[in-house]
Amino acid sequence: MYFIVSYRRAPGMRFDSRYYVEQHIPLVEKTWKPFGLDYIDAFFPSRADSDVIVVAMCRFKDRAALDAALAAEETAIIMADIEKYTDGEPDRHVTEVFQLSR
């Protein structure tokens, strides 16, 4: 189960990539690991003209773990941290892992 958060570039939008990588991602890991976060990866497009700034993929053990993390009181700390690195709105998606049988 993945919780995917992405940011799209917008005119005049502020996004501090360094803060995001050095402060926000570790905060998410520390806060959500006890609820079943396995890991988080952040992807930055290599093209400077990309519409996407970053895509973060949070891998959870299962849907119950994701729901517990999102409902946790501690998640307010993560949400309050967003304004420290951006004034943009994230896109959020919950996805299942699709695997072909081999």
Image (cartoon, helix red, strand yellow):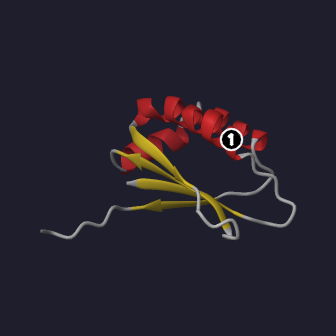
User: In the image, 74: left or right of 19?
Assistant: left
Q: Residues within 10 Å of mark 1 (few under 14, many from 20)?
A: few
* Residue at far left of view: 102
Question: Can you give x and y, in whole percent of width and height, for residue 44 in the image?
Answer: 58, 57
Where residue 2 sits: x, y (%)?
A: 42, 54
Residue found at x 57% / y 39%:
25
Looking at the image, can residue 2 be seen?
yes
Examine the rendered structure and indicate whether residue 41 appears above or below residue 8. Answer: above
Residue at the spot 41% in from the left edge and 41% down from the top edge? 39
Q: Residue 11 location in percent, x, y?
A: 85, 66
Task: Locate residue 52: give its quadrant.
Answer: bottom right
Q: Amino acid at mark 1?
A: Arg
Task: Give the residue displayed 54% in from the left and 41% down from the top.
Answer: 71
Q: Residue 20 in the image: x percent, y percent?
A: 66, 42
Give 63 or 2, whichever is nearer the viewer. Answer: 2
Horizontally, residue 39 falls left or right of residue 49, namely left
Image label count: 1
The residue drawn where x is 66% and y is 70% is 50
Name, please, the residue furthest toward the right: 12
- The quarter of the displayed image where residue 73 is located: top right
Q: Nearer the viewer, residue 70 or 57?
A: 57
Q: Is residue 79 visible?
A: no
Name the residue beneath numbered marker 1: 18
SS category of the residue bearing label 1: helix
Query: Where is the N terminus found, in terms of image quarters?
Result: bottom left
Q: Name above or below for residue 47 compared with residue 14.
A: below
Q: Quadrant of the C terminus?
A: bottom left
